Image (cartoon, rainbow, N blue to C red):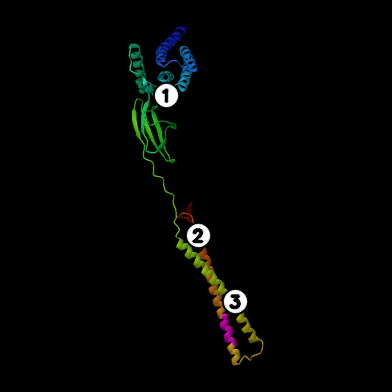
Amino acid sequence: MGARLLFVHAARAASLSVVLAGACRLGAAEPPPRPREVQELIDEAEMAAKRLELAHARELWARVNALAPSTMAVCQLGQFDLRLDRLEEAAAELEKCVEQMPAPTDDIERRRYEVRHADLAAVRQRVAELHVSPPPGTARLLVDGREVSASGPVFVAPGQHEVTAIGKQGQVVRALVKVAAGQSRRVPLPLFEAPKAPVTSARAPWIITAGAAASMTLLLAAVELREAGDFAEHETSAKVARLSDGSMAPSSAQFREVYDEASAADSRASLFHGFGTAALVAGAALGAATVAYVVWPRKAEIRPRCAGAEVRLVW
């Protein structure tokens, strides 16, 4: 068992020898001097790698890259992420590393150059690659909720993924894509829908003016008709009082004349009261209709239901 553990450690140390050698060589190519904090982090990362503390070494290189971004740091992140099985991150970092590496000038640089390309080719076979074409006006582009850039490939694990574009006005379009390991696929997203113009309701001023005027006219007419009816009612009462005060004989021509006048006044009172009530109802209804026309919702839908009708208002 002890011999087997020694073999495993030896194999891991051998796999990291290229990483450490690359770090030293790339470090020599960086413009000196480095900030003291950065150099201390690099030294600590190399010691962690020698102790096979890969996650800690990777964390230290991430801090180095945050403080002083460089090709060396990106390449080291790609190497450690590959060995930590963080394949999507490793693919993106090694892609950037290979793009930024200068052409080799000697055998050591050529060997390192070949190793980086080989690692990138190996990790590409284990991940999938998306090339997203977002619609014009895209403000944010997401793959499985992770914000990405459309300027380069997006590396993902094999399987199904959701690609989302969010427009500057909040529009959203989505697409589902399924990819296999080693596959490169283009993902064109549909165009955003044009923002819908708010529904407005143009109110005709002449309708409002005419409705208000007609309503007021009917209400005033109702008042005058009611007053005329009340006057005719008083006249009827006065004539009836003369007929019953005994001043005239029922068979006299004067009695018959007063009786006819009382009957006509009573008819006028009923007629005026009836027309006044009708004008009052019509004026109030027309006024209510005019107010409803002004304040009614911009859009209303009436839908039939089994037990009646449903009115759906949209403000």
Q: CA distance from mark 3 to mark 2?
A: 33 Å
Tell me if residue 61 comes above or below residue 232 in the rendering. above
The amino acid on which the numbered mark 2 sits, given as a three-letter code, is: Ala
Is 2 placed above or below 304 here?
above
Q: Is residue 101 left or right of residue 280?
A: left
Type of amino acid under label 1 = Glu
Residue 51 in the image: state x and y as whole percent.
48, 12
Residue 87 is covered by the magenta coloring: no
Sort mark 3 into few (<14), some (14-19) or many (20+) by Cα contacts within 10 Å.
some
Q: Give how far across and how far down residue 222 sits, in percent.
A: 55, 71
Q: Determine which residue is flagged by label 3.
A: 230
Q: Which image quarter: residue 90?
A: top left
At horizontal 44% and vertical 9% (from top left) the residue drawn is 4
Q: Secondary structure at mark 3?
A: helix
Question: How far apart are labels 1 and 2 at the CA level?
Answer: 63 Å
Categorize mark 1 by other alpha carbons within 10 Å: few (<14), some (14-19), many (20+): some
Amino acid type for the residue under numbered disc 3: Asp
Residue identifier under label 1: 89
Identified at 57% across, 76% down, the residue is 229
Q: Earlier in the sequence, mark 3 or mark 2?
A: 3
Q: Residue shown at 37%/27% (left/top)?
A: 128
- Between 102 and 155, the one lying in front of the other is 102
At 58% across and 89% down in the image, what residue appears? 257
**Does 58 sit left or right of 134 as displayed?**
right
Label 1, secondary structure: give it. helix
Q: Is residue 223 left or right of residue 70?
A: right
Q: Which residue is mark 2?
A: 292
First along the sequence among labels 1 and 3: 1
Mark yes or no: residue 277 visible.
Answer: no
Which stretch did the figure color magenta? 258-266
